[in-house]
Image (cartoon, rainbow, N blue to C red):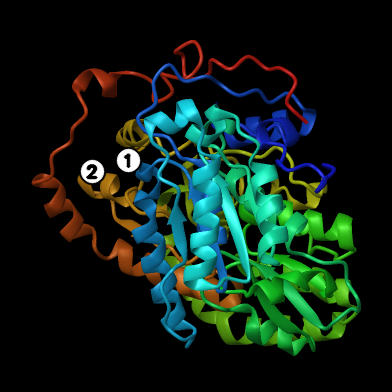
Amino acid sequence: MSQINIKEPSVVIREKRLGTINAFTGAASEIVEQSAKGQLKDCKRKFSQCLGCNQQQAFCQLAMIRDAAVIDHAPIGCAGEFADFNFTYRVEQARRDLPPALGRYFCTNILEKDTVFGAAKKLEETIRLAYDRVHPNAIFVTTSCASGIIGEDIEAVVDAASKELGIPVVTCTCEGFRSKIWTTGFDAAYHTVLRGIVKPAEKKTNKVNIINFWGSHVFDDIVRRFGYEPQYIIPFSTVEELSHVSEAAASIHICPSLSTYMGAGLDQLHGVPEVLVPPAYGVAGTDRWLRAFGKLVGKEEIAEEIIREGHEKYVPEIEKLKERFKGKRAYVTAGAAHGQALITLLGELGMDVVGAAVFHHDPVYDSGDDKLDILGQAVKNYGDVPDYRVCNKQACELVNALNRIKPDLILARHGGMTLWGAKFGIPSLLIGDEQFGIGYKGALNYARRIDDALDSIEFIKNYSKHASNPYTKWWFEQDPGYFQGDGSGKGCAQGRGGF
């Protein structure tokens, strides 16, 4: 179990805290075994086609808090993501019947001269400007590579501003260079909320924290069936609501890659227990999750009722669709925990998962409990994934692997990945809502969508005849892991991980 210390202004990065890596080539069983033994070691890439930024992931959580303002202490280029987040914020408000409002995002616009003479004054002025313009109930200051290089005492600036304005003004230390693991940005955002917003519990309530991105609210009926009220955090919460999440009866993970830090923090600091089983993907996975939640809240009989009803309502159609998937070979590309959950779901649907490209790998989560080992359980229950690669959205590696494996289906979570399957004439399914596959209905949702995707084979084949590919013949002759380690694709010598 990692120890969460909110007295420190900065979160401990995942490489040090969990031993997280972002490069691996091998079988899923290998990475599971090395993770369990503490022998996993990251590979260095000699070439990267793209990189994720943990600052962006921190911002994507804090920017969705309804009555807070976020100040990006950065050059204006780092504010290029504001439009994207504002679009998401407005669309998701409409889905939730919330009053329409623009995102409250500001940038200090650090210039070259500021890196020489300092940008603290700019930050002070921007904090006051944000307060005067939008009157937020909290202000978060996200740091950047530029502000980190300057090395100014940002904590002193925000502490003074908090006293002056009478609201929480909190630093989120998330410079892009701080961590190579983009999900460290989620941890940074949660560390910020835990140390600056969440208050000790005055009482315990019947609310259940659902640590979420901004997907559909599929847990509403399930949680209420047990006699509890769902509370989705962080996106679309208010500052006041977040200040009381310590009073909840339990916390649920939509995706442990996202929420491991917040769940463990609420448990360690405030005694809010986590549901420590993999997310409810697939029939067997949903059975397991419901029983774990029922046991946690002392209502096992309700769990058994929901399980019986779910099997009666959804399983017959799922079983029929499984007959159509026999012999089909699938490839998964997604974030780590979500991708591993999809491997489980595909295995249950009777498909052979021949490969996966996930964006990082956590050997252990902050709870330290191996019951959350999603990949280990998938390998144990549905067999090995022979081509399992940890690949932080390196399209070149994905394309090379697809060219070799040529699966019957590609399942993706993030935009820009399914394009490559279509170019090879492979039916590809992109589903961005991480809650689309939750529960018995979610398993049926995926089964239906997979069936539709496989039916598109003729269209995809015709499309591929006219599609161009930017990669050279030389590249397709190399191992997909050519740029990892020593160039063999398996160039990471075993060594002690970081946990």
- Identify the residue at image location x=44%, y=68%: 103
Number of disc labels: 2
- Secondary structure at badge 2 equals loop
Q: Position of residue 499 (x, y in %)?
A: 78, 31
Q: Label 2, on which residue? A: 424
- Secondary structure at badge 1 equals loop
Q: Amino acid at mark 2?
A: Phe
Residue 68's tag is none
Q: Position of residue 242 (x, y in %)?
A: 71, 70
Contact (Cβ within 8 Å) of mark 1 with mark 2: yes
Q: Label 1, on which residue? A: 406
On the image, which quarter does residue 293 sit in?
A: bottom right
Mark 1 vs 2, N-terminal side: 1
- Identify the residue at image location x=45%, y=48%: 108
Q: Position of residue 112 (x, y in %)?
A: 38, 30
Q: Is residue 241 above or below residue 265?
A: below
Mark 2, residues whose alpha carbon is within 10 Å: few (<14), some, or many (≥20)?
Answer: many
Which numbered mark, 1 or 2, is in the foreground of this view? Answer: 2
Res 453 seen here? yes
Mark 1, residues whose alpha carbon is within 10 Å: few (<14), some, or many (≥20)?
Answer: some
Q: Is residue 357 above or below residue 318?
A: above
Q: Amino acid at mark 1?
A: Lys
Q: Nearer the viewer, residue 226 or 446?
A: 226
Q: Nearer the viewer, residue 310 or 3?
A: 3
Q: Nearer the viewer, residue 137 or 358?
A: 137
